[in-house]
Image (cartoon, grey):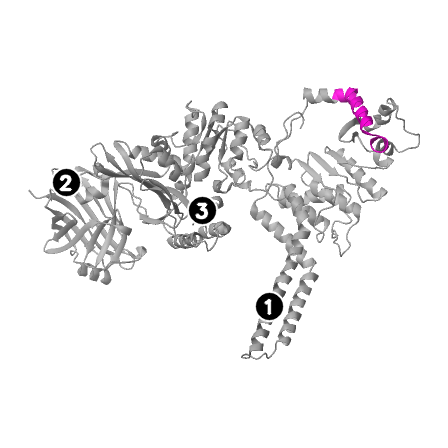
Amino acid sequence: MNGHPRPISSVFRYMVGYVVQDDIFSGTLTVRENLLFSANLRLPQSVTVGERLERVDKIIEQLGLSECANTRMGTESKRGISGGERKRTCIAMEMVLSPIILFLDEPTTGLDAATACNVIKCLHDLSRKGCTIVFSIHQPRYSIFELFDTLLLMSHGRIVYLGLSTDMLSYFDKQGLLCKEHDNPADFALDILTEETDDSTTKDLYENYLRSPMHISTLAVSLNRSFTSEVPRIVQRGRSFACQFLYVSQRILRNARRNWQPYFWQNICAVLLGLLTGLLYYKTPQTSGSSVKNRLGCIFFVVANQIFSTATALEPFIKERALFIHEYVSGYYSRSIKHAEELCNKLRGSAATIRALHFDRDNSDIEKQLQFIQPDLIVDASGPFQSYAKDPYRVIKACLTTSINYLDFADGSTFVQGVTQFNAQAKANNIYILSGVSTCPLLTAAVVRRLAKGLTRIHSIKGGIAPSPYADVGLNVIRAISSYSGQRVTLVRRGQLTFSYAMTETMRYTICPPGHLPLSNRRFSLVDVPDLKILPDLWPNLDSIWIGAGTVPEILHRILNGLAWLVRWRLIPSLTPFASLFHWTMNLVRWGEHRGGMFISIEGSDREGQKQERSWHLLAEGDAGPFIPSMGIEAIVRRILDGKKPASGARAATMDLELDDYERIFQNHTIYTGQCDSIKTNSSSESPSLYQQLLGQAWNHLPQSLQTLHSKKIVKVAGVAQVERGASIVSRCVATLVGFPKSGKNVPVQVVFQRETNGELWTRSFAKKSFSSWQMKGSGHSDRLLMERFGPFTFGLALVTTPGKLHLIVRSWTLFGIRLPAFLAPYGDSYECDHDGRFCFHVEIKHILTGLIVRYHGWLVPNV
């Protein structure tokens, strides 16, 4: 257009209007309502309701539709406006876009001469207001022919004339084809092109045209491209799905209200058939053999009637099919560009040029789309990659054809593994095609490499992703999970390639970077991710691998597990049809912590042949988690900007980043990571203390006084404390029952430790008042927690470190081993710290029902 590449189809259709030969509209709506429907769905949201109404009124006036503006278009059973008014209404529905070009397919078909002339005059007036009008026509009268500016004549698919309509007769006159004095020039041209021409004559006309000055001048203009104006930049005008749903629903309700007769008679027929059936089988005996047959006949009659009566529901779909196809092609319904535009607005001010565009991955012209956009890099995040059945690598092939670099977020194992088939072609084109540039398998592979340092062999890999329940999970993610739930998944076990079934195998795990508040213990289920196939290629001696997802609320997770078992037992073929329901439910039913996480655990052997277990934990607070899958893309782009371009070729992106690249990006978000290692012990070395085992790497960040008190060397400590009890009667009773000390200042304190292999007994003495508790490592649901038991109550405490302090936070509690609601657990600000090299403590115990129970703080030093 204007010497520039034509925009891609999804953008081009908002720059032009197209009026089809058959008049397609909603017959029960008025002229104004049809125009408003077109305006509401096709104009951008920035155009207000008042501006849309004003534009519709202006177009109605321009096309001479004022008298029939509030008249219904008409249906097969009810007459409406005239044929010419219908055609002008169809033109008006396209004019609401203010198109650059308006295409029409035989706009005068079915119209009488006078009406056809009025329609063409209307188009002529529009052309004088800046809109280019292009239409096909077969037999116009002379008054219509006079309105043409430029004329294109074709015969047998070849151009024989392209020039001014006023020059046509003189052009053919020079070729010996004369028009009689009173003949219609349009009829004369039609005779030349049809009745009096054969293939040889058409060839002569075509060759004469190629040698004509008009063709040479047209060719010179197109090659020179000396146009005064560029193609206007059109912002995508598709409305959001909610708007589309609203306006289409309004139209359907109007149709039903104005065309009520079919619905009325359907209900009448249903009532009459019900009465007839009831009368026929009234007072049928209940026990005799014939009555059983009669009842079966009644049931058959009712069921058959219901089946055939539902066939009437197909009629609206058949009638509306042509209307829907026309509206879809014309851009009434579109992908949600709203989110793309919102993202672009958020990113304004960056160095990059940002535009919101439609890109159709299934379009046959995808190469042309890429050439028009001319990107340096394509990032495919459309998904779900498990569902690209016909041509899953369509975008990759287009990138290879156009020599454009490619990255994707693919999490489909088969898709990522199959990318290597394009390796030779990518190297030949000197481009990189990287698949799986996401959490799985890129981040997991980088983590395993970090954990495997110093090990000679890796025996097993386990991992899991635990998203926050408040993370907005996309529909494509749910579709991907639904597509493979209950289906076979290839993995490695006992060193052999075998299979299992997705979402039917489960395990529990607690994600806890050392020194941070752990994520609640999650239930993880096996998922189909590229890691299951690709990581065994990186570590060929791997005995087993398992990757899962731990979604919450757990009740929904268990329901999905149950449905996956139905697929595994082949009671239902797939969960894909339920993906939309799952998506709606997961984004509606939410509770729990707004935190997510990830873990990778490996088992291996070191050079001495001793087995080691190492795990890496990631904790993402708030809304940080959903950004992690895209951080691999960000890291690669940053490396490219630093001049570190990925090597050419097509492959799974497992070796293109290291964990250091991710950690630099994690620092800009509320994301915390840490590593937990099994500590080797032998007969000559001392085993670590209870707190040292729980804190792992965070132990080294504790002040020396805290490390000393929690080491195995210390048996008794003493000091002074200030004690304060709650004022309420209930809190005092609870404190007395547990054995907490009474209120007092400068109360002498002594703590005696009895350390054993399975835990520690702490006996605290405040003056003459003593109480004891047993501390041990948690397991199962309480894994990675410090469990402290006071009589029948056991509390799960998280050990959280901050600079100079060790906090103890209640995460769970039980009574006689029965888990109690977490929101009813005691709470308070309890911590240990260092002051001038001396161990200090601050313990506060409150409850939602009683308020403060006890608070004591002071210092302790080891007894010599």
Q: Look at the image and tell me in which quarter the C terminus lies.
A: top left
Dot placed on the residue nearer the N-terminal end, 2 or 3: 3
Q: Label 3 amino acid?
A: Tyr
Q: Label 1 amino acid?
A: Phe
Mark identifier at residue 770 = none
List the residue tagged with mark 1. Answer: 300
Q: Label 2 amino acid?
A: Thr
How dense is the environment of label 2, judged by Cα within 10 Å: few (below 14), some, or many (20 and up)?
Answer: some
Span highlighted in magenta in the image: 191-217
> Residue 204 appears in which quarter of the rendering?
top right
Dot placed on the residue nearer the N-terminal end, 1 or 3: 1
List the residue tagged with mark 2. Answer: 708
234 part of magenta stretch: no
Q: Nearer the viewer, mark 2 or mark 3?
A: 3
List the residue tagged with mark 3. Answer: 484
Q: Is residue 491 left or right of residue 845?
A: right
Determine the secondary structure under disc 2: helix
> Residue 341 appears in which quarter of the rendering?
top right
Direction front: furthest residue = 289
Determine the secondary structure under disc 3: helix
Dot placed on the residue nearer the N-terminal end, 2 or 1: 1
Q: Look at the image and tell me in which quarter the N terminus lies.
A: top right
The answer to which of 327 and 614 lies nearer the viewer is 614
- Marks 2 and 1 in Cβ contact (< 8 Å): no
Q: Is residue 632 left or right of residue 34?
A: left
Q: Is residue 462 above or below residue 224?
A: below
Residue at 77% in and 49% down: 68
How dense is the environment of label 3, judged by Cα within 10 Å: few (below 14), some, or many (20 and up)?
Answer: many
Determine the secondary structure under disc 1: helix
- Marks 2 and 3 in Cβ contact (< 8 Å): no
202 part of magenta stretch: yes
